[in-house]
Image: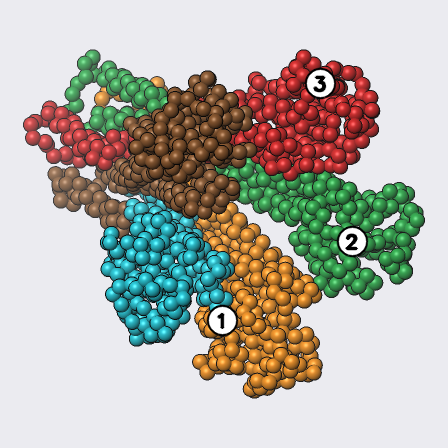
Chain colours: A cyan, B orange, C brown, D green, E red
Amino acid sequence: MVTIFLNRNGQTEQVTSIDRVWLNRSSNTFLWVDIEAPSIPELLILSDTFAFHPLSVEDARAELHYPKIEAYDGYLYAILHGIAFSDNSEEFATQDVDFFIGHNYLVTVRTGPSRSIESLQENAVRNPKVMNEGPVALFHRIVDAMVDHYRPEVDRLEERLDQLEAEAFDRPNSNTIRRILAEKRRVAGFRRIVIPQRDVMSRLARRDFVDISTDMSFRFRDIYDHLQRLADDAMIFQDRITGILDAHLSNVSNRLNEVMKVLTVFTTIFMPLTLVSGIYGMNVSLPHLPGGETNQFWELLGVMTVIVVLMLAYFRRKRWI
Amino acid sequence: MVTIFLNRNGQTEQVTSIDRVWLNRSSNTFLWVDIEAPSIPELLILSDTFAFHPLSVEDARAELHYPKIEAYDGYLYAILHGIAFSDNSEEFATQDVDFFIGHNYLVTVRTGPSRSIESLQENAVRNPKVMNEGPVALFHRIVDAMVDHYRPEVDRLEERLDQLEAEAFDRPNSNTIRRILAEKRRVAGFRRIVIPQRDVMSRLARRDFVDISTDMSFRFRDIYDHLQRLADDAMIFQDRITGILDAHLSNVSNRLNEVMKVLTVFTTIFMPLTLVSGIYGMNVSLPHLPGGETNQFWELLGVMTVIVVLMLAYFRRKRWI
Amino acid sequence: MVTIFLNRNGQTEQVTSIDRVWLNRSSNTFLWVDIEAPSIPELLILSDTFAFHPLSVEDARAELHYPKIEAYDGYLYAILHGIAFSDNSEEFATQDVDFFIGHNYLVTVRTGPSRSIESLQENAVRNPKVMNEGPVALFHRIVDAMVDHYRPEVDRLEERLDQLEAEAFDRPNSNTIRRILAEKRRVAGFRRIVIPQRDVMSRLARRDFVDISTDMSFRFRDIYDHLQRLADDAMIFQDRITGILDAHLSNVSNRLNEVMKVLTVFTTIFMPLTLVSGIYGMNVSLPHLPGGETNQFWELLGVMTVIVVLMLAYFRRKRWI
Amino acid sequence: MVTIFLNRNGQTEQVTSIDRVWLNRSSNTFLWVDIEAPSIPELLILSDTFAFHPLSVEDARAELHYPKIEAYDGYLYAILHGIAFSDNSEEFATQDVDFFIGHNYLVTVRTGPSRSIESLQENAVRNPKVMNEGPVALFHRIVDAMVDHYRPEVDRLEERLDQLEAEAFDRPNSNTIRRILAEKRRVAGFRRIVIPQRDVMSRLARRDFVDISTDMSFRFRDIYDHLQRLADDAMIFQDRITGILDAHLSNVSNRLNEVMKVLTVFTTIFMPLTLVSGIYGMNVSLPHLPGGETNQFWELLGVMTVIVVLMLAYFRRKRWI
Amino acid sequence: MVTIFLNRNGQTEQVTSIDRVWLNRSSNTFLWVDIEAPSIPELLILSDTFAFHPLSVEDARAELHYPKIEAYDGYLYAILHGIAFSDNSEEFATQDVDFFIGHNYLVTVRTGPSRSIESLQENAVRNPKVMNEGPVALFHRIVDAMVDHYRPEVDRLEERLDQLEAEAFDRPNSNTIRRILAEKRRVAGFRRIVIPQRDVMSRLARRDFVDISTDMSFRFRDIYDHLQRLADDAMIFQDRITGILDAHLSNVSNRLNEVMKVLTVFTTIFMPLTLVSGIYGMNVSLPHLPGGETNQFWELLGVMTVIVVLMLAYFRRKRWI
């Protein structure tokens, strides 16, 4: 689906097809062409109408590209990632958005719905500020909105880490390690998306490309700071997950210690008792304990009680119980 | 709350509002405007009176920014972190202080009380040296005081590490790993605050910005050295915590070994004894031991004693007991 | 085996020997000489006909070189790696292909069959585009095809990692660690092949060498992106394998915990029961339990049942069972 | 304590106070002022007589500075570390020495006795070579001697590591981990002292400062090489300690295995024997074994012997014993 | 021992002493002076005849220097390492060779026999190619031969790693960890020798020094490639050893699991049996089992058999046996 906005003399209107005259450098117009889930004929707009380099057109068609920005003859080509709509799953999904930024046009290509672009489209005609500042400013607006959508994702990640930490410390189970590793992969994936976008913003802020004004470079530096904080958060999360993993492994060992102490205390208390009962079960003439025949049973139980008390005292001194 | 100091001809006085004439480059005055916990109208001073760039004003309003320094047209904008007052908790808290350093003004924006700034304000009128050297020197004075407040925090961290080390070596318990990881996070957080401030000082010391005189660069290099030592301390602390964690895990294993040795020694001593008693408890005609019926019991006890002595000798040779 | 294609005036034909005239810079021809599994006389083509530098000829003869590109006087010499045909084994095999890229010739030297080169040779005569664009473009075509063959290998690696992860989590056995380490080595080997090839492409894309046109540099940047993604995939795989190893070790400890719990539960339940039976097996006058001689057996079994129930309740409270 | 040497026309004499004329650039003299454990009035020499920058004077007063070198207007300021005299403890102690290197003076400031400086002072008057080459050469001589004192410390570290390795492999005890971590901290501390001194020498060897002649840069490169080797040694030590820690942890696990094998072998051998004796202790009519009443005891012992032999064979096949 | 070769007009002859005329830059001669295990008078050749800088002469006398190359006035000074002859030990030994490369001389200094140098000396007179190309080419020849001797050492390292891997997986014993750590140290030592030599070759290949022709730089790049492959091999070895260590630790844990399973299976099977026998050994009136007095024994054995079968089924379901 192709949506086209034309800005002429400060007025924005939505049009249905592109007049090649508008693309002329001296035409005093600014075009925003947004292509969602492009069909093959729609892609011809890129290669024919705009005559973009075949390699950038091919990149725009492919999915799963890492964020980057490249200068081609007459335009900048950028790939950035937005957070996709799938709110119900734990896994966040990202979505490529491709940008062709020319002297008087901005072309955006995306594979599915994008909150950032759609909310700007809704305002494009009503609010002249959206398009009056030119293609680089519009590009900045879209990217700014895209990056703003990262924050809730980070908050959800943090929330899950809190839960995971509590689980690892207090209720570890055989599934904990699996969840820890899944979360670790998610955080690594998040960082892998944020870092190259930060680098793209850094290049824009440093004005590596001629088309960026000083003021725009300040704005890109602001997005850069935002992405830098997201990258720092991801780093902190990675440290936390490493800590949770360490704690989990340490807890597993600690619980083994607990189990072994229970076993050892029980075993070492009952073995002497069993021996005493075994000795007085021998079919030899047993020595008569003082106090007469009928009291022997209780005297032996008394011996056993003494053994138990001594063993418990021993383990208490060792701080096992 | 806005506090304004005006330095004119070497005299400092506190004033209540800003005369725009003073901001004129040729006015031979120097203004220090300190805004604490700014209200919306007070923030207008930044955007209207001083006409700072909207992005830096927005940064000054937001919290939780990482330390940085940026050159804008006509002024430097810096974010640095002070240690906040909360002395009773284990967690140290940091507080953003924003600086706008212009040719004849310094604007500081902060969200709460700041020991460093307030003690300078108390002296500003009495002591002409505070403001006579100009905005960069005043900025240096504030930052120097802020960084001086880091040292006690480091000392408290070190003290807690000493305790933690003693606990991990001598009295490990199920909470130790939790405390180790909490301390690790605190040290990492401390480093994350110190490193970017060091980098800001490094840029000032290297005179990346035109407004810094050679002498001021020496002074910033001094703060840089101070922060570098703090960063080194944080690094040393991280190494120590890693060592404490290693020691803790090793101790857990060692104690397991101890538990198992106790279990094994007890078990392997009592099992043969129980077997002897079991054999003489069999309902078959038992061979008569030499020495007559009445001595058999004591002879069997003698056999058991020999077994115990042999086992103890065996474990002693193995160095288990 | 030597295969020679001659492109003259836009027409490509296969020839059997090289006319030295064609090598003349002004001859308006373009030669592609492909040498497979070169014999000693065939190697003379490199040293005599083309007069390549002895060191590059020696490199072309040797196997097991790491990918690199070097500028010699009048030609570029590159070593790149293709994926060899061995589809049945788990181990992927790579194959050196050496390229000599001159002003009007391309010489490829390889030790065995190469899908990429052979499919281009089949089309070279029919399809004039293959050779009309000159040696650098032909070099790009071959490398592009070679790199395309890496993707299926990555997919197979990923598949094996999925299996390995499932095995480590659900069916760990004594062979798992061996398989984990073997896979780790394979991924490291894969990365070791991809990274230097990426660097070669990076140098071509940055136009470190004079013979590369802007348009060709875009195409090499495309291959660079492709290799970068492969390198990123290898990095992700390495992270995953580290995670699988952690999970495996954690699982081993967890299972030990399980084993010990079973042992402890059994031992601590049966030891008191055995003691009761031992006590009532002693040859002393036992106290008569209430209810008469014949019920004593059942009363003792009742006592044992109570012990079992108490122990089970204890372990349930400890969440062991 | 202030010690002053004056070199004039190739003659060195010890003087008691400084004539300001000597500091004149054209005075053809060379002064060496050594200040040990400076009192407040003695520090005035730095700020008043030599008029050094307040920041460098403050640095010279403070302790615990990391090695560094800085160019001030008219002189170089360097902090380096010597090994202090405390030979009886395991902990090595370092000592700051501050250097002010001017066009015709060298000022050294130190907090305590320094073998390197004192031995040069003893020779300064007798041996004209000590001071005839000027301040940079004298600075080199002192640093060279200071660095020479590091080697014995490294040898002692290595010796202790040898002992620790033997202990970890052969006689591990509950204190081993503590000693390993203490040694690790010591090596890290050593490296932390050597690395920045190496960097100072590197800057001198690269002639970052104008006052260094080519020949002096060769000499500083020599010290640089020396410090580089010390840093490499520290790195090797760190690797060794990591290895010792791994070995220790592996040994703890191995010994646990040994303990468990002893327990398991004993338990699994005695339990069947106890069962046999228990079965023949049952109060039911037992089947008569062949051979008559009196041989039953020996026949049951024979059965038990067979069980022991079978179990031992089983464990031998499993290579446990 | 000093060996001197003089190359004059393409003819090489062995001479016994050095005529100072030959050292004259215009003398059209080329001298190769090889000094093995230099005595003090022989070292005077370096300081007096050639007048080398005292620091480089001192370096040539000392042992245990790390590989490096330095430009002195009029000559290059390089230290490189050869593999020494000790073939019988597991430890490889390296040997310093010092090179002084001047405009018309090459001086080599070594502490012991060197295969690379001696085989060239044997051919120097017969084969004019050895010395006709000048000092840099001769230096290259020697280094090339030295580096060729590294390969067999790498092969032996690899062989030992194969053995070690098999041992760690299949026959781990208490010595395995010791051997793993020893091998790790050896590989680290190997890398520590190769890396700086590679860097020396890199500087020669990049022509950091004026005396290197383009063609010679190609040849040094070839040695650089060779050393790079050796360094890569060392890296692969380090990865393998890390993997072997992981596998060893994992195996130790696995075997503990095995031991514990055997213990648990035995214990949990025999404890119920012993309890049954204990209950029927109690001195109370036991309930008569159906089938008459004489069958009770067999009925109880039947009960025990059922218990054993049930326990075995339980452990089989848990996949322990």
Indicate which disc residue B56 carries. 1
Mark 2 — on which chain does it sit? D
Residue type for callout 3:
Gly
- What residue is drawn where x is 52% and y is 64%? B67
Residue B307, compared with residue C264, is above or below; it is: above
For the residue pair B268 and B93, the one nearer the viewer reads as B93
Q: Residue at x 68, y 21 (%)?
A: E132
Judge from the rendering whether residue D246 lies leftward or rightward of residue A175; answer left or right. Answer: right
In the image shown, does C26 or B115 lie closer to the viewer? C26
The answer to whether C105 appears left or right of D82 in the picture is left
Q: Chain of mark 3?
A: E
Is D18 in front, or is D154? D18
Q: Quadrant of residue D221?
A: top right
Q: Quadrant of the C terminus of chain E?
A: top left
Rendered position, B56 above or below D320: below
Residue E110, position as x, y percentages in the image: 69, 24
Q: Nearer the viewer, residue E299 or E71?
A: E71
Q: Which residue is mark 2?
A: D101
Mark whose residue sits in front, 1 or 3: 3
Q: Which residue is mark 3?
A: E10
Q: Residue at x 67, y 16 (%)?
A: E128
CA neighbours of label 3 inside 10 A, class few (<14), some (14 to 19), many (20+): few
Badge 1 sits on which subunit?
Answer: B
- Secondary element under disc 2, as helix, strand or loop, is strand
Comparing labels 3 and 2, the label whose residue is closer to the camera: 3
Amino acid beneath label 1: Ser
What amino acid does circle 2 point to?
Ile
Secondary structure of residue under mark 1: helix
D52 vs D201: above or below: below
